[in-house]
Amino acid sequence: MNHSQPFVRTQMLEAKEPPLAEKGVVKWMRENLFSSWLNAFLTIVSILLIYWVLDHLLPWMLGGIWNADSLSQCREIRDSLYPDGRDVACWAVLSDRWHQLLFGFYPPELYWRPILTLVMFGAAISPILFNGVPRKLFILTAIAPFAAFWLLWGGSVWMPVVVALGFVIGWAVMKFASMPLGSLVATILTILLPVAYWLFLAGPLAGALDAAVPVGIEAVQTDDFGGFMLALVIGVSGIVLSLPLGIVLALGRQSDLFIINKCSVAFIEIIRGVPLIVWLFTASLLLNYFLPPGVQFDIMLRVIIMVTLFSSAYIAEVVRGGLAALPRGQYEGADSLGLNYWQSMQLIILPQALKISIPGIVSTFIGLFKDTTLVVFIGLLDPIGLSNSIRASTDWNGIYWELFIFIGLCFWIFCFSMSRYSQWLERKLHTGHR
Amino acid sequence: MTIQVVALLLIALAFYWLGHNIVSNLRQLGKDFDFGFLWSRSGYDINQRLIEYSNNSTHGRAALVGILNTMLVAALGCALATILGVIAGVLRLSKNWIVARLMTVYVEGFRNIPLLLWIILIFAIMTEATPQPRDFRGDNPDASMILFDSVAVTNRGIFIPSPVWGDGAGLLLIVFALSLAAIWAFRRYAHKRQEATGDILPVFPVSLGLFLVPTLLVYFAFSAAISRDQYPLMGVGGQQGATLEQFVEENRNPSICAIPDTAVVNLSTELRAIGQRADIVSVSSAAQMQESLQSGDCVLAVMPPDVAATMAGSLDGVDLVTLGQTIDRGRPLQFERPQLAGFNFEGGIQLRNSLIALWFALSLYTGAFIAEIVRAGILAVSRGQTEAAFALGLQPSRTMNLVILPQALRVIIPPLISQYLNLTKNSSLAIAVGYMDVRSTLGGITINQTGRELEGMLLLGLFYLVLSLLISGVMNIYNTSVKLKER
């Protein structure tokens, strides 16, 4: 018999280092940059492109001049600094005019008011955006719109208070009249009473209160609004006002009631089929035709109304998507619990549908915020309008790129962080069932 | 039911209130509601037009020019945006790290900055950072034309070669149409055969061959037949047998009579090469050419040799000579290059800065959105589909065509439709660069001149509404054709 002694290793061998091409930077580059001839070619082209762009852009940007009063002074400084004829940016236009780009012609001593409004707005929407914030802040959310209006435009404190009172009246009617009067009458009263109050009572009441107890801050005209402040005011009020309207329209479009359904569809499709710029021109040229003779509106209010109607149609479509995404069982479950239409919407359907549609609402808001630049065509001074007026002054005649870069960067930061937030939310809300 | 009746009443009331306000406002302003202004003289010029238009045309015609301009930039934009979007969307999924990052920068950069800013930025680049036409002049110019001297990028726009149809172009078109029909028939046949027998015919190479070969063959055959033909040049005054250069020394910037064809394009190219402008008087027949020469409308004429033979010496009181130089008859299809003449480029097609800025900005902006749609569509097809196709033994190209694309397209097309709609509506931003679209003509100058803002804005809104419904209608038909067929 052949006795062979099998060899059994009792110890593990030390692991060998991977070959040089299979580890570290080399491996990464081989896999991610040069995995095939085509990829190698694309990589080299991309690197050349990046180098070319940076080579042109970086010296121009980094060598920029920050201290000058006018473009010609900027050029003098440049020629003395760089005798080789190099072209550099003239950032001095930003240090000279940044306040205009941000606030328009808002009085400089009152800059604290828009800033305070912004802080308040941030605090007011934080309970909506994030879970970890105390719920009590919702009170601030309810007060914020009126306080923001008062802070921005100034004037007597009583006007916003009296207007807010209308909502309180509506809420009270809803709360206490539905039992004795039935829901239909109560709903009609909830709409009619505050409207009647605003139309006939609010103005005299504010006047009387103001005469009795004059409390107010310095008023600022709409003409003085401008820059990113204007874009934010229009964008934010557009989205805040259009959200309820959009939800109502979406419910109308989903509804079985023939007339309401057709009216909602017609409204949504007509608004969405026509560009915003045409609606803005309608606001500036035509809105007076639709109002009783003699009634005049502030141009900014007209723009906000149009922007609200416009984005409510888009929000309606987003919310409709959320409503359609809910499984049928949710509607049936609500019905089987014996809830009526409004109860089931309020307690079961809308919370889920809105949760699904928040990313879409955020992207609608990004779109709306970008679209606020269009108000330049009806004479409001948004950042682009201000860049035109800065260029029209003798000091800064002929300056383009620096202003464009600044405005673009501001918009980019704002919109990009919004879209990141919505992606984060999408991940957070991805909770198993849909 | 009660709610519906109440709602109907409220809506009717609101409409009555609005209508009543409009009527009383119009009465107060002393205006009526009348579309008659569409048929009155417009009195303004439009520099960018696809159809005949002058300031004597009607407002309706101006609106039509604007509508066509809107559709032009929308169609160009949709095409380029789709190309850019598909490329960027696919490259964003590429395994190549640096390319994927570059595409992310492109997408995020364009999506998060207002379109209006991009339009005016590109317009500023086109007007401020490009050379003037005069920089192209001289022996050592500051700027030069690109792509074999055929494209000039100037601050007055981009000049590109324009196609000119010569003799035999009709035949060329017929052959091309026939080969398209043949491609269609072959694909049908190949499909039927595959269904019946399972054999797969090489559809793509045959289609490509049918697309190119017959047309090119006819083109070259025709060119070989006629391009050596020379057309004589007849001049008024000057010496018998003089060269073109000698002739233009006496007649600067001569006006040319010709039946429009490739020969006159070749003549104007030669004239511009010796620094002359070519003023072309189009005539439609030999008799008309004779008349124009006699009346002095033009001093130079190019014509086929048989016409020249009848022409010589037949004109009363006009000293008609035959120049020593002749002109190529040209090819069935040739391209007229832009050439520097005077203070600007002549010949070719001028793409104005307004069009370029609007087109590029719309395409780049919408392309960024389309890239995300394409990426989402490709990601929506699960990996298992690819693996299953490979397991069945399908080649990668067939896997793409038969398995991945049909499923991805189903996800891609609905949002793509809304991007096309957005692009079309966003083309109304033409106002920022002065491109004469329908908003600038009908909704801008016409309204300002006639004071008919109610009617003008109504028509404008109606146009956009109809266009949107049309586009979404057409694309929905396509969508149904690629949609999952469920029974």
Image: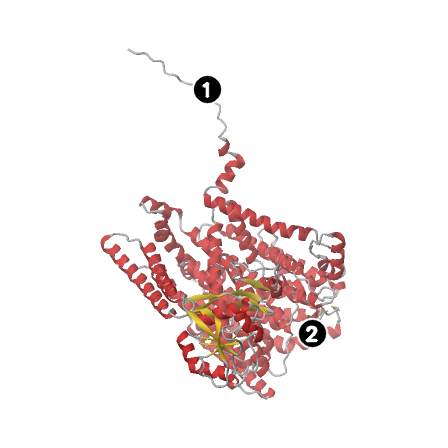
In the rendered image, the residue lying farthest to the front is B240
- Relative vertical location of residue A160 with respect to residue B413 in this rendering, above or below: below
Q: Nearer the viewer, residue A408 or B339?
A: B339
Position of the N terminus of chain B by quadrant = bottom left
Q: Name the residue tied to disc 1.
A: A11
The first of marks 1 and 2 along the sequence is 1
Q: Secondary structure at mark 1?
A: loop
Residue shown at the point (59%, 70%) measured from the top left: B342
Side (left or right) of B414 relative to B447: left
Which percent across, then down, holds residue B13?
51, 80
Q: Name the residue tied to disc 2.
A: A206
For disc 2, the neighbor class at 10 Å (few under 14, some 14 to 19, many from 20) is: some
Which percent across, then down, holds residue A200?
63, 78
Side (left or right) of B83 relative to A54: left
Which percent across, then down, holds residue B19?
53, 83
Residue shown at the point (60%, 86%) measured from the top left: B29
Q: Chain of mark 2?
A: A
Measure the C-alpha gap from mark 1 to mark 2. 92 Å
Which percent across, then down, holds residue A351?
50, 58
Q: Nearer the viewer, residue B348 or B443?
A: B348
For disc 1, the neighbor class at 10 Å (few under 14, some 14 to 19, many from 20) is: few
- Relative vertical location of residue B285 with respect to residue A49 in this rendering, above or below: below
Dots 1 and 2 on the same chain: yes
